[in-house]
């Protein structure tokens, strides 16, 4: 028995240092190597590097360690752009050239398509990146902490709720840096107390910036309903930032990690701002979901539209339509688009967005897609195409089964989580569909996140 236990013991110990060759990349962008056959995950290490690693965590089947020294650097290793990279938890791949980032994201999608979906990884196309992989985020959510005399406003340290004071984030639109600077200085000068999540005292919890093409919104998340020196704060923001057309106080008194509370109060300008995707306009409130990378959103949605292969006579179901952004792209070429979303306010926004953009060939339904799709089928609706764009957890299996029951010729799956997408693809390929191609799109340069668009066709339709 003692010999068996000895064989099961990990060959590395926490606190000890080992030399490890990195051969791959993990799901969170970390390097993956082996020591005596035992898997070790190493953040900020790249494939083909030899690194000296100090082990911090040892589990039954793997360990995690920090780089002590890069002994043999990859040719793709570059100096990070950001001064707090490695401490801030927002980015994971600034140490890799952008060409290498795109390669790593392509390989990560191939890996899950082969391992989880059990499909040919060669169906995955090279990841599409933007012309400029910096300054792309049109939405900023900065936590606020510290004290009146020592305000902290920036981003959370990796793996913690400690706030790193940071003035210039290189993946944020420069407008968000400006909003941060003005709000920081105004809070300091006016003596507005930052929120303390441990004592549950203070006022401002987060500063959120939304940068539209023509209009900016500032959202001040507050523990109390009315912010001290509120009008003076508004005056400071508006005077310094003339593009701001909306300032909103979001009231969130709860001890929670959820950023926004349910109640908004506009203290300057409009309740919403207008932003655009190509020639489509959308009204954005503080709670509205909208993609954070405008350039790559166009690429993502154009790819989804291309994969539908619409000719003008089709009925399309958008099964997780949200506020109707993809639905309106589809409506440009489809005969009829039916959007389904379980969140009622999102459907109301979708209806308004369709009306605003002049699309009368759309219909939006509040409900669970697993319930609504069979109901539509019984009513004689037979979609030619079904589009999925679910949350990170992927589709419910009963939604997938409902889709299979409607037998569309094509299913287009848009995903922010390749692993859950791959799981759902495996289910669909067992139900009479085949995977045709997968297109990764880099919506979030410098991070490990990647969006994907997959096309599946009904096997009978391809014969």
Image (spheres, helix red, strand yellow):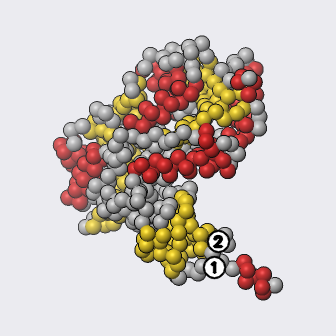
> 271 left or right of 58?
left
**Looking at the picture, does residue 154 appear above or below residue 389?**
below
Q: Residue at x 77, y 38 (%)?
A: 430
Residue extending farthest to the left is 239
> 275 left or right of 63?
left
Contact check, label 2 and label 1, Cβ < 8 Å = yes
**Looking at the picture, does residue 18 appear above or below residue 168?**
below
Secondary structure beneath label 2: loop
Examine the image and state in which quarter residue 461 appears. top right
Q: Residue at x 72, y 32 (%)?
A: 433
Mark 1 — residue? 11
How many angstroms separate mark 2 from mark 1 (CA)?
9 Å
Residue nearest the observer in this picture, 350 or 254? 350
Q: x%, y% of residue 190?
A: 22, 57
> 343 left or right of 280?
right
Q: x%, y% of residue 38?
A: 63, 71
Mark 2 — residue? 37
């Amino acid at each position: 028995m003692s010999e068996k236990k000895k064989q099961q013991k990990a060959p590395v110990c926490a606190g000890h240092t080992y030399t490890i060759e990195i051969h791959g990349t993990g799901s969170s962008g970390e390097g993956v190597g082996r020591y005596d056959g035992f898997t070790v995950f190493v953040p900020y290490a790249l494939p083909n590097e030899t690194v000296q690693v100090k082990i911090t965590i040892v589990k039954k089947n793997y360990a995690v360690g920090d780089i002590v020294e890069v002994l043999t650097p990859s040719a793709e290793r570059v100096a990070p752009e950001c001064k707090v990279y490695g401490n801030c938890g927002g980015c994971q791949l600034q140490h890799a050239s952008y060409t290498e980032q795109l390669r790593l994201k392509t390989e990560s999608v191939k890996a899950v398509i082969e391992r989880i979906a059990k499909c040919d990884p060669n169906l995955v196309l090279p990841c599409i990146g933007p012309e400029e992989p910096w300054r792309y985020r049109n939405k900023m959510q900065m936590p606020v902490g510290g004290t009146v005399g020592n305000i902290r406003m920036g981003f959370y340290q990796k793996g913690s709720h400690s706030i790193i004071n940071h003035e210039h984030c290189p993946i944020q639109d420069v407008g968000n840096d400006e909003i941060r600077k003005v709000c920081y200085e105004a809070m300091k000068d006016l003596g507005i107390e930052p929120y303390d999540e441990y004592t549950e005292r203070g006022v401002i919890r987060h500063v959120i910036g939304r940068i539209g093409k023509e209009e900016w919104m500032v959202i001040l998340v507050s523990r109390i309903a009315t912010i001290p020196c509120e009008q003076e704060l508004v005056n400071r923001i508006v005077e310094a930032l003339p593009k701001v057309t909306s300032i909103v106080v979001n009231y969130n008194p709860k001890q929670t990690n959820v950023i926004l509370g349910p109640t908004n109060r506009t203290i300057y300008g409009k309740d919403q701002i207008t932003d655009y995707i190509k020639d489509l306009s959308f009204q954005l409130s503080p709670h509205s979901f909208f993609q954070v990378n405008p350039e790559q959103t166009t690429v993502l949605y154009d790819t989804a539209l291309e994969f539908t292969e619409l000719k003008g006579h089709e009925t399309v179901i958008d099964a997780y339509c949200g506020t109707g952004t993809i639905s309106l792209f589809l409506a440009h070429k489809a005969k009829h688009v039916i959007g389904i979303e379980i969140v009622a306010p999102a459907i109301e926004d979708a209806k308004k967005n369709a009306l605003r953009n002049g699309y009368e060939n759309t219909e939006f339904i509040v409900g669970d897609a697993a319930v609504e799709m069979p109901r539509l089928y019984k009513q004689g609706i037979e979609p030619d195409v079904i589009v999925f764009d679910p949350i990170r957890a992927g589709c419910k299996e009963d939604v997938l089964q409902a889709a299979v029951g409607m037998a569309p010729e094509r299913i287009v799956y848009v995903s922010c989580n390749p692993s859950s997408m791959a799981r759902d693809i495996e289910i669909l390929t067992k139900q009479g569909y085949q995977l045709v191609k997968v297109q990764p799109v880099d919506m979030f340069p410098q991070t490990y996140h990647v969006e994907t668009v997959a096309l599946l066709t009904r096997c009978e339709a391809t014969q």
